[in-house]
Image (cartoon, rainbow, N blue to C red):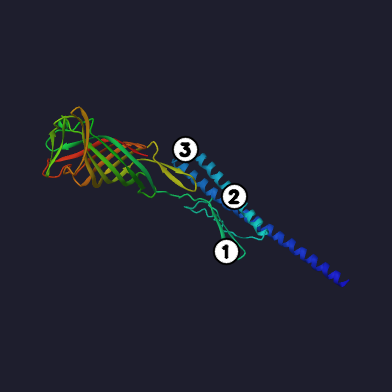
Amino acid sequence: MKKIVLFTFLFSHLMLCFEISAQETDDTLQQKKDQIIREEKEALKKKVLAINERFNEGEISSEEAEKLKEEAAEIHALNIENKIAILENSVALSERGGVYKDTIDTSTEKGKDPSRLKIQVFDDEDQLIEISTGQQKKYDKRTHSNLLVAFGFNNAIIEGQSINKSPYKMGKSKFFEMGWTWTTRLAQNSNSVRFRYGFAFQFNGLNPTDNKYFVQDGELTYLEEFPGSLTKSKLRMDNLVVPIHFEFGPSRKIDKGNYFRYSTRKKFKYGIGGYFGFNLRTRQKLKYTEDGSKRKDKITQSYNTSNLIYGISSYIGVDAFSVYVKYDLNRIFNEPNRKENNISLGLRFDL
């Protein structure tokens, strides 16, 4: 009889402990849920105050302010939903014998994404077996890159001679440029001045007038009448250069709450700078008819062109489109040839 009473007492005491433990687990879980909600509400409150301040200072319109508030509210509502789901799943994991270590990043400091979550699952020997993290967007991205494409008309400024009397065809002499550039915002809290740099391939062409072609005779390079009938005569210089520009113009700040970006879409811009590099190849292309047959010659040689390329350039436009001009400070043909400098005018696209 005493054994039965003792067993009943121990069983009742054990069940009471389980109930207390379960109650404590429920209480702890609810406390963590309440903490998550408080933190997200406080973070949302700070964002709303910041948006109101921008509206009061005239930086954004009332419509933009309301849109930003709605976006912020949606972000933090999803944060609460996701974090509570993770918390509840961690409890379910522990009930199945797994071990969960809480490493949820609930930080809402400037520069951190409050929706970024990190979960680490460990086995019974405390060995990490899985890591799952959300994607974090860079809060302030000061540098971005673009594809550069430019093309247009090409010619030469000849010392002591008007460009109207140029020996090169105005409409036929052309240039093409393609490369990759990076743009870095210089100021901490403004995008009005940007530094643009990169690399590009330049192809500058000169098409002689009056059935002439280029002849290289030692250190001299000059135009000479072609013995046959030319249908095409073109000298092309292929350069690899490093363009450097300072770009000026307004932009629009886009605030996404947990990160921001500057946009120059549909905005005016003006760039001024230059470039330097070297000549990769010089080639002359001739098309003509000889003895009733069409001939095509491609002659690759130096033609005494400069190996070092450097010059000044500028562009002005809106968004990705610009009017573009560049001028080589180096001579096209080395001394003792007459002084000629390449000049180009065309369109530029920063895609």
Residue beneath the point at 37% across and 43% down = 146
Q: Farthest residue in the top direction?
A: 292
Which comes before the other along the chain, label 2 or label 3? 3
Label 2 to label 1: alpha-carbon separation: 25 Å
Which comes before the other along the chain, label 1 or label 3? 3
Work out whether 203 lies above or below 291: below
Give the mark toward the camera: 1 or 3.
Answer: 1
Which comes before the other along the chain, label 2 or label 1? 2
- Locate the C terminus and report the quarter of the image it occupies: top left
Give the mark toward the camera: 2 or 1.
Answer: 1
Q: Residues within 10 Å of mark 2 (few under 14, many from 20)?
A: few
Q: Is residue 291 left or right of residue 87?
A: left
**Nearer the observer, 93 or 321:** 93
Q: Which mark is residue 272?
A: none
Q: Residues within 10 Å of mark 3 (few under 14, many from 20)?
A: few
Q: Which residue is mark 3?
A: 61
- Locate the N terminus and report the quarter of the image it occupies: bottom right
**Nearer the observer, 129 or 6:** 129
Q: Residues within 10 Å of mark 1 (few under 14, many from 20)?
A: few
Amino acid on which the number 2 mark rests in the picture: Asn
Secondary structure beneath dot 3 equals loop
Work out whether 47 lies above or below 97: above
Secondary structure beneath dot 1 equals loop
**Nearer the observer, 56 or 261:** 261
Q: Which residue is mark 1?
A: 127
Q: Is residue 190 visible?
A: no
